[in-house]
Image (cartoon, helix red, strand yellow):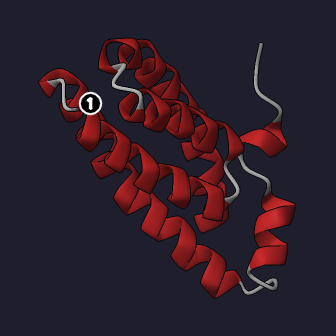
Amino acid sequence: MAADPAAILDVDALERQTGGDAELRGEIVRMFLEDCPQHVDAIGGAIAAGDAAALASSSHALKGSAAYLKAAVVRDRAADLERCGREGRVADATAVLAALRTAVADLLPELHKLTL
């Protein structure tokens, strides 16, 4: 089942957050587009290394970025990964990382629409 479009990216909430400032919104989107792949790579590396602390830290950073962007599905999957790290359940994180990657793949086209 596909995610609710507003859960993928709540454009109205993002507009409210930025006060309708298209330049600010664009900067937030550009920063996320730059940082997100690095966070996802760091999460994958932490899982591969069995490093629960790095998993929690990298996931927390992505969670915050996604929350600020109003991307609920990515935020929620990052929160799930952060919890796996904090609880030392690194082995459980592989499936959650796959879900995160799907959520990011769903989000990217929505973000690119905002940068056109």
Q: Position of residue 13 (x, y in %)?
A: 83, 64
Q: Quadrant of residue 106?
A: top right
Side of 94 where 23 appears, left or right: right
Most extreme residue toward the left, as rendered? 49
Residue type highlighted by circle 1: Gly
SS under mark 1? helix
Residue 113 lies, in percent from the top left, at 65, 56
The 10 Å Cα crowd at callout 1, few under 14, some 14 to 19, many 20 or more, is some
- Residue at image position (21%, 33%) is 46
Q: Which residue is mark 1?
A: 44
| Residue 75 appears in view | yes
Which of the pair 4/111 is nearer the observer?
Answer: 4
Which residue appears at 80% of the width and 73% of the height?
15
Task: Locate residue 75 relative to residue 92 in the image: left or right.
Answer: right
Q: Residue at x 17, y 22 (%)?
A: 48
Q: Is residue 43 left or right of residue 18?
A: left
